[in-house]
Amino acid sequence: HGLYTLEAIASILPKSKVKYPERPRSMPKNSEEEAFERKKKKLEAVVEAFNAGFKTKKDVKADG
């Protein structure tokens, strides 16, 4: 994001030869992998919480 922002700002400066970027630059592979891992961990937490809700309801029904 920083390079895109830098190019966007530089493009409006007087006598600048930098053109406004048409689209954001792609993220390096490491960042993509890190983003995937963060999403994976977040999904795992959601699934765990969802499953915990079932366990709680099941326990309540068993108690009567």
Image: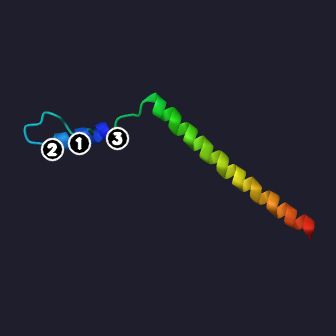
Q: Vertically, is 55 above or below 3?
A: below
| Label 1, residues with CA under 10 Å away: few <14, some 14-19, many ≥20 | some
Mark 1 in CB contact with mark 3 (< 8 angstroms): no
Q: Position of residue 24 (x, y in %)?
A: 34, 39
Residue type (three-letter) at the residue carrying disc 3: His
Q: Is residue 60 visible?
A: yes
| Label 2, residues with CA under 10 Å away: few <14, some 14-19, many ≥20 | few
Q: Quadrant of residue 64?
A: bottom right
Residue type (three-letter) at the residue carrying disc 1: Ala
Q: Position of residue 60 (x, y in %)?
A: 86, 66
Q: Is residue 51 left or right of residue 18?
A: right
Mark 1 in CB contact with mark 2 (< 8 angstroms): yes
Q: Is residue 57 left or right of residue 39?
A: right
For marks 1 and 3, give the CA distance. Answer: 11 Å
Q: Quadrant of the N terminus?
A: top left
Q: Secondary structure at mark 1?
A: helix
For marks 2 and 3, give the CA distance. Answer: 17 Å
Residue at the (79%, 58%) spot, across then down: 54
For marks 1 and 2, give the CA distance. Answer: 7 Å
Residue type (three-letter) at the residue carrying disc 2: Ile
| Label 3, residues with CA under 10 Å away: few <14, some 14-19, many ≥20 | few
Q: Secondary structure at mark 2?
A: loop
Q: Vertically, is 12 above or below 31?
A: below
Tell me, for residue 12, which label it has, or none. 2
Marked residue nearer the N-terminal end (2 or 3): 3
Q: Secondary structure at mark 3?
A: loop
Q: Position of residue 13 (x, y in %)?
A: 12, 42
Q: Position of residue 36 (x, y in %)?
A: 55, 38
Q: Between residues 56 and 14, which one lies in front from this camera angle?
A: 56
Q: Which residue is mark 3?
A: 1
Q: Which residue is mark 1?
A: 8
Q: Quadrant of residue 5?
A: top left
